[in-house]
Amino acid sequence: MDKMNDAKRQTLALLVDNEAGVLSQIARLFSRKGYNIEAFSAGPTENPGRTRITIDVYADEPHTELLCNQLRKLYPVHSVKRLNTENSIYRELTLIKVKAEGSEKRNDVMQIANIFRAQIIDVSLETLTLVVTGDSEKLKAIENILSEFEILEIARTGVVAIERGKATINDESKERGEFNYGKNVL
């Protein structure tokens, strides 16, 4: 069965130990299974010893479940959650440098920035640089409109996501000794 049949974008949230080599283990797992990570973001959490990772991957339902189960087996991984659009909030940050020579073009770009609630963070005689946050549809929309002005450069963070309401990623049910490879467990 071809992996791309019924494949759709899946968002996985991971809570991992903040230690060297964790990213390498996760990337190797995706590579071994033949999946490309479409978007990746990582950052500190409320616990300084933990990092939260958000990964976007194209996969079908059975393969997504397999990836989640394999991720859970990695020792530094505390929890894995599959996020869905109905119960989660997604945001991404994009920096866009646009060619805007002349006051008329700069004014046009600034009006577009206002419509999209973007901020102008750098101005020169030839360019404007904007920062935009939002979901991927909003970012695609502003990119499409600004393409008329010649986009010189784009830098995107990748998606970060969190569940709505009181649900959290914290899952302390994993027995840490179960996958404690190479370490003495009493």
Image: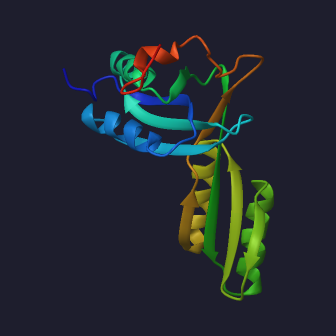
Rendered position, 157 above or below 15: below
In this rendered view, identify the residue nearer to me: 128 or 155.
Answer: 155
Residue plotted at (73% across, 22% down)? 164
How are the colours assigned in the image?
rainbow
Residue plotted at (56% across, 62% down)? 155
Q: Position of residue 32 (x, y in %)?
A: 25, 34
Label tally: 0
Q: Where is residue 106 in the image (x, y as percent from the top left)?
A: 74, 78
Q: Position of residue 74 (x, y in %)?
A: 42, 26
Rendered position, 14 above or below 145: above
Residue plotted at (81% across, 60% down)? 114
Residue plotted at (61% across, 60% down)? 145
Rendered position, 113 above or below 18: below
Residue lying farthest to the left in this orientation? 1
In this rendered view, identify the residue nearer to me: 68 or 88.
Answer: 68
Name the quadrant containing residue 70: top left
Q: Position of residue 75 (x, y in %)?
A: 45, 26
- Which quadrant would the N terminus be assigned to in this image? top left
| Left or right of residue 114: residue 67 | left
| Left or right of residue 19: residue 105 | right
Name the quadrant containing residue 69: top left
